Image: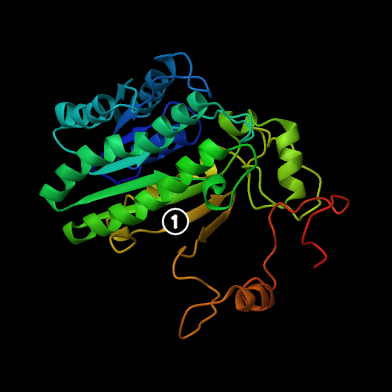
Amino acid sequence: MGNLLEGKVVAMTGAGRGIGRECALLAASEGARVIVNDPGVNPDGSGTDSGPAAQVVEEIKKAGGEAVANFADVSTMEGGESVIKTALDTYGKLDGLINLAAILRDRMIFNLSEEEWDDVIRIDLKGHFTTIKPASILMRQQRYGRIVNYSSVSGLQGNSGQANYGAAKAGVAGLTRVAARDLGRYGVTVNCIAPGAATRLTATVPSSARELRARSGIAGGGGPAPAAGAAAPAPAPASDPMRGPDMVAPMTVYLLLDEAWNINGRIFQVAGGHVGLLQDMYPPFKNIFKNGKWTLDELRQLVPAQLMNGVVNPAPPPADLNIPGRNA
């Protein structure tokens, strides 16, 4: 076992399977005492199973580490607070928090129900807030802390059929940036990972959705986006070492280290052997200026000629569809 996290206590949500499990095992192997939170729900959020979290705890203990399971539903404040309370009750402190809990309810926007929207937002976005809020109170008082959130390419670039998931994950990116500004002065860092790996969640994406995303040049959750028009990638097999969830864990755990003290408010794409620092969404990368109010005629000329010149529509209509304005 290593010692890079010796003496640290780290709580992780959604840590019973996939990327969360790998993060828990790696952090524990570096000396961290880990709270493994996972209610054991299905990819769509249904059901419960204490087995996954308990099994990860058992694996950590067999390897000589320390861990305790927590089975709370972090979509509620009570559940999120219980994760932090478990850390304090068991180990008397909390140094790090990793938020990985997520579900999928994929459906095209015109078929998406209010319940499907609410369920995903509640777990995938609110489930970050419910743990960050109590953790931030503690970390602010102790003038130290590391928080790592999980966004997605769906929230940063957009995936068809994932309006609820994409909105939640875009919200996580925004939450990360704001929380980083709120907490940085207290010695607390808040960063975010947008992963690409083969997991239970990515395996549930229908082949039709993968094909649509591939035609649009959008990644399907296993790495960088394919070229527009390329064949849809199949779900990455668990045997593919470059697509395993363990490939995402090292960068996540690195952000917990003391030496990462000056990395704050950043979003990293991690897929296979690739780690990329994403640009900020603001300020804009292209601009047009006028000392006064724009007219519609001016915008009709300058928006296509300058502002949008070279900018690709991520989901253009087919060439044979009669689109008003296309040939204007």
Secondary element at tag 1: strand
Colour logic: rainbow
Along the horizontal axis of the image, is 271 left or right of 237? left
Q: Is residue 85 left or right of residue 105?
A: left
Q: Is residue 72 above or below residue 126?
A: above
Could you say which quadrant of the image residue 92 lies in? top left
Across and down, in percent, residue 198 comes to 61, 36
Q: Nearer the viewer, residue 289 or 280?
A: 289
> Would you say 187 lies left or right of 314 here?
left
Q: Nearer the viewer, residue 26 or 77?
A: 77
| 322 relative to 241, above or below | below
- Residues packed near mark 1 inside 10 Å, few (<14), some (14 to 19) or many (20 plus): many
Q: Position of residue 209 (x, y in %)?
A: 71, 36
Where is the C terminus found, in terms of image quarters? bottom right
Examine the image and state in which quarter residue 304 appears. Answer: bottom right
Residue labelled with disc 1: 267
Closer to the camera in the image, 29 or 53: 53
Image point (23%, 59%), residue name: 184
Q: Could you tell me residue 272's position as x and y percent?
A: 59, 49
Residue type of the residue flagged with mark 1: Ile
In the rendered view, tell whether residue 146 sits above or below residue 101. below
